[in-house]
Amino acid sequence: MKVTREQAAENREHILDAASKLFRERGLDGIGVAELMKGAGLTHGGFYGHFSSKEELMAQACTRALEASVEKWRSRGLREIVQSYLSSRHLDNPGAGCAIATLGSDVSRQGAPVRRAFTSGLRSLIDVLTRLVPGASAAAKRRKALAVYSSMVGALVLARAVDDPKLSHEILQAVASSVTGR
């Protein structure tokens, strides 16, 4: 049965959505193409009709996840971003959360297309934060934005890594207080 262009485009969107979520849950090398396609509700055989390689899919899935974060952040203030980012909900849902925190160490071992997508998304997130943080100059605001985001990512990574829920929440609260001044 021949697939229409519209159905092919819809299938591609399903693949990207599933990959974006599954990569954040399991890591870039923690899931194969067959499982990704199954997660999208499609057969493994159709993958190469949409993507030339798993690397291409990884790059596009990173782009998708990071663009979604940028869009959310653009409509929020700094305090709201920090509270949401350092929340129990974000902590407990890596598949729907920050790709930087879940995939950062994986991306460092990937090729140029994946790293380029990741870098572009990171720059966009930092640009949003730069507009929101206080600072005497553009350079000071950018340094502050980089420090704030690095602190938030580090807190989330550590909070997910420990096996003590009390310590996990203590980490998130400490960084939230440090960043917001509360």
Image (spheres, rainbow, N blue to C red):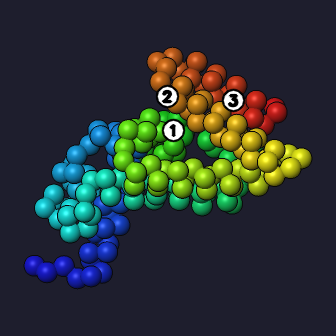
Looking at this view, name the residue that lies furthest to the front: 112
Q: Which residue is mark 2?
A: 160
Asked whether 24 or 40 is in front, the reply is 24
The local crowd at label 3, few if under 14, some if 14 to 19, many if 20 or more residues have their Cα within 10 Å, is many
Under circle 1, the secondary element is: helix
**Whole-number angstrom distance, CA of label 3 to CA of label 1:** 15 Å
Relative to 113, say whether 84 is above or below: above
Classify residue 27 by image quadrant: top left
Q: Earlier in the sequence, mark 2 or mark 3?
A: 2
| Residue 37: x %, y % from top left | 23, 56
Under circle 3, the secondary element is: helix
The local crowd at label 2, few if under 14, some if 14 to 19, many if 20 or more residues have their Cα within 10 Å, is some
Q: Nearer the viewer, mark 2 or mark 1?
A: 1
What residue is shown at x 47% (from left), y 39% (from top)? Answer: 104
Residue type at the position of mark 1: Ala
The image quadrant where one finds the N terminus is bottom left
In screen coordinates, is 133 left or right of 116?
A: right
| Residue 73: x %, y % from top left | 65, 55
Relative to 63, say whether 82 is above or below: above
| Residue 157: x %, y % from top left | 52, 30
Q: Which residue is mark 3?
A: 175
Q: Earlier in the sequence, mark 3 or mark 1?
A: 1
In screen coordinates, is 179 left or right of 116?
A: right
Q: Earlier in the sequence, mark 2 or mark 1?
A: 1
What residue is shown at x 67% (from left), y 59% (from top)? Answer: 74
The image quadrant where one finds the C terminus is top right
Q: Which residue is mark 1?
A: 101
Asked whether 89 or 151 is in front, the reply is 151
Residue type at the position of mark 2: Arg
